[in-house]
Amino acid sequence: MARIKGNIKILSTVCLMAVASAGVGHAQDKPFEGVTLNLASMNDQFSTVLVEMAPEFKEATGAEVKVDILDYGSLLTKTTADFVGNTGGYDLITMDIVWAGQYAQNDFTVDLKDLIERDKAELGTDDIYPKLMDALGNYEGKQVAYPFAGYANVLAYRKDLFEAAGLDVPKTMEELVDAAYKLTDPSKNQYGFVANGQKGPAVAQDWMQYNAEMGGSILDEDGKPALNSEANVKSLEVYRDLFKKAAPPGAADYDWGGREESFRQGIAATMQTWSVGAPGYFNPEISKVVDTVGLALAPRGEGLPELYGIGGWGLAINADINDKQKEAAWAFIKWITSPDVHKAFNMKGAGSYIRKSVVADPELNAKYPFLPLLDTAFEKGDGDYRPRIPEYPEIQDILGTAVNSVLVGDEEPKAALDKAQDAAVKVF
Amino acid sequence: MSRQIALDAARRGFLFFMLAFFLLPFIWLATTAYKPSIDIFSIPPRFGFTPTLDQFRKALSVFDVPSLVRSSIFIAGGSMVLSLLLGVPAGYALARSSHRLAMALAYFFMSIRMVPAVAALIPFYLMMRDIGLVGHWFSVVLINCVLNTAFVTYMMYSYFRALPKELEEAALTDGCHQFSAFWRVSLPAVRSGIVASALFCVLFSWNDFLFAMFLTQLDSKPISVALLSAYGTKDITWGTLGALAHFSTIPIVLIVLFLNRYFVQGLTKGVH
Amino acid sequence: MALSASTEPLVNQFAGFGGLTFAQRRKMFLIAMALPALVYVLGFGVYPLLKGIWYSLYDYNLLKPARTEFIGFGNYVELMFDSDMQRSLINTIVFTASAVFFELVLGFAIALALWRDDRFNRICLTLILIPVTITPLVVGLIFKGLLLADYGLIGYYLAQWGLSDPRGLFASQNTALATLVFIDIWEWTPLVALILLAGLKALPTDILEAAAVDGAKPLRIFRKITLPLMLPSVLLALTIRTIDAFRVFDSVFVTTGGGPGNATNTLMVYAVKEGLSFFNIGKASAIANVSLLCTAIIAAALIFLIRHYDKKASTQ
């Protein structure tokens, strides 16, 4: 009996090998031989690393991963069309955390709860920051994506300028605003502060961060829009004055690229930013502030609870693909987020952290000494300062116009936010 | 005579100025491909840099450039051929018909050319899904061709109308078959119009971003779409953009050069 | 008229089959020539478009399918009172009119300069066409990079020498739209030059030569002969560019996002935002249809012009 079984096994192996066109063999260890996974990836730092590491996954499982690197707009448009049209073009999708509400509402992606439960032992979810597990894919009980690339708001600052002015690294927003004014000297082309001013998502997202740090909030306790609250108007006034007096003049039209470049060029003394860009400031190939840059936790308004803005990307599985593809896609998620692979992923500069063990890894810490900041930020993370609700895109757009109008001097903060509030109420 | 020379010099001077105007911004982008990233911007801006091919290496390692260029050529070539096949006869027919409806139809075609793409994009996407073409480059050809055919029809309509009818009528009275009168007499006479239409189709499809972004997948993605993925939200990798712009521009310049020859030839051999 | 009257009986002798007259066969032949294009455009163009018009009568958002509801002209009524929409419409009209005007003038000058067929001109034409070959989004990025006020190659000096707002051309209410017009001119003038050059090359050279031999001044030849003969080409270029400028999206999208405030918001930026970011298909279709209506009006005006000159030409 055993012999027959063995023979059948050999026979089936031979068959499988014959079927697998490449005939690479090891059919049993490569459960997904012949499977191709299309991954729609945001063109953040991790995207090129995904391309680089895809062959290793093929080596391990047989499945080929094709990474389609897309800009933010194309990613959103194409994947949504794919979901809505049920075309199943992409198997895996990187999901911005603010899309979670829409994904959950429409069941675009596989709810991963059952799979996580099934493979609990293998996943080691205890090692993943709970805040990230929640923010990067959980929405009202549905796990629409698996955490994959966690970012934190951090403060990048110029050590040399702070030292020369005899200032301490700001811990509160009040100190940051104060320092920004003190470190501004247009005659030396030196500015204390820089942030996005360009109309649209750029200015909306940066302001929402500052707003949260100054104690403002986009929604009220009942989850309804409260754009023109007193705290929000006040924080927008501060923000506008910073742009007027302490930011490089061109900042009114900066988006992320413009803002980052201006800091790397050395004209801004402080900049709040996503941690994923931080390695860039220390990279002499692109940065002119390599020796003088410092990183700190994002400041917080005096007396406010200690919270740090977090964001980033989850990895989601398209609900429209067949079960075999889903299994393979799930295998890829498990693989890329497993401790060893995730460490290697970050050693190559992906800047995408989710695991406590990876953030604490000595080798990575030697390479990226700012990792302890991420540990604190992830432990006390706030993933909802940009509300992850289905109406988020509209809210962001409304704010994008309102805040930009204030920055360029078209409107007063109060009037602009009142108007925005009226528009926002209509969306709900 | 000296007046002629002065005029010629002025003409050349003007053209050199125009060349500079149209090329310098592009050259700036192209040179970013040879600069180390650190040299792309500086304060104050300067021109000098240490040439390097790193940006090309990076771009080629991340993007499957041959596949991107191939898709672009398929899309541009395919929609050019299809649009000419459909549009040139239609333009001829409308120009030659004396029916009242003919002119109305010509304007109908022109108005199709104006349709804002967004209005039709999603219905078209669902249509392509139903015939199983989403993700195939041919779906981009199909939608590009709607606009291109409309344009070619209208453009050829005006070219054929400018052509004296007598030429053909003479051929027809000689007992020439209708199609060969079209093929042998009218068509060669509007060669410049055809080449201009072809150029226009190629340029339009080569540049198209919205349709291609919406309808293609990784394997069928043209270079116009890939170019934009260098424009990140967190950062703009100007060097990659510059390197990719080479692969997007060189083939089309070659195509334009090639068509240009016929453009000029067709014109000098014209009927006038 | 006299010609066709005399030739028709003649060709009728050749009427080959089915006893069809030449006129009938001619008609069938012309229909057969036009039909494929017509069917194609109806099937792949008009059909999705009608669907789009149908959608515009709904409150229809792909991300909120449960909310779908027929609202008749609700989307249009909403747009009528929408200040964003009004501003977008005005911006689009100003943008289109100024861009097309400068493109025609400059394009004509270039076409004239390139008229003579020599090697230099052929190379020149090819090189000048390069801007047209670049994806419009990338064109926007090039100028964004060049015009950055703090470190862009051109923007830096403009700001330093006080030639632009210190915040840069894109961040000032007064210059943002004009800068976008400039970008459009950069990108599309070569195409206008190409269309006009095709027209110039098709001119009956004998008439021009005869006029020159008669001793007419070049400027007079240009005004009295070249320009009238060029009208069809000019109108073609005008039509094409008006239509496309009216749909401007890409360069705006990457440089200003429609800002500062709403200073550079255009109809297409608005429609694409509603359609492809919010997937608010009903409203996006309505905006697109308003834009379609505007282009139709413009086109009708242009067609009126074309026919007017056609008549004039045929009576001359």
Image (cartoon, coloured by chain):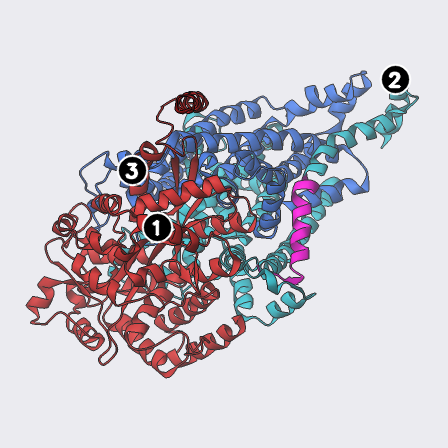
> Which one is nearer the viewer's eye here, C32 or A135?
A135
Q: Is residue B30 visible?
A: no
Q: Chain of mark 3?
A: A
Question: Where residue A34 sits: x, y (%)?
Answer: 43, 30
Magenta stretch, overall SS: helix
1 vs 2, front mark: 1
Quarter occupied by residue A310: bottom left
Instruction: Assign a secondary structure to mark 3.
Output: helix
Q: Chain of mark 2?
A: C
Quarter occupied by residue B2: top left
**Residues drawn in magenta:** C41-61
Tag 2: amino acid = Gly
Q: Which residue is mark 2?
A: C16
Would you place residue A58 above or below residue C88 in this image? above
Q: Which residue is mark 3?
A: A52
Q: Which residue is mark 1?
A: B232
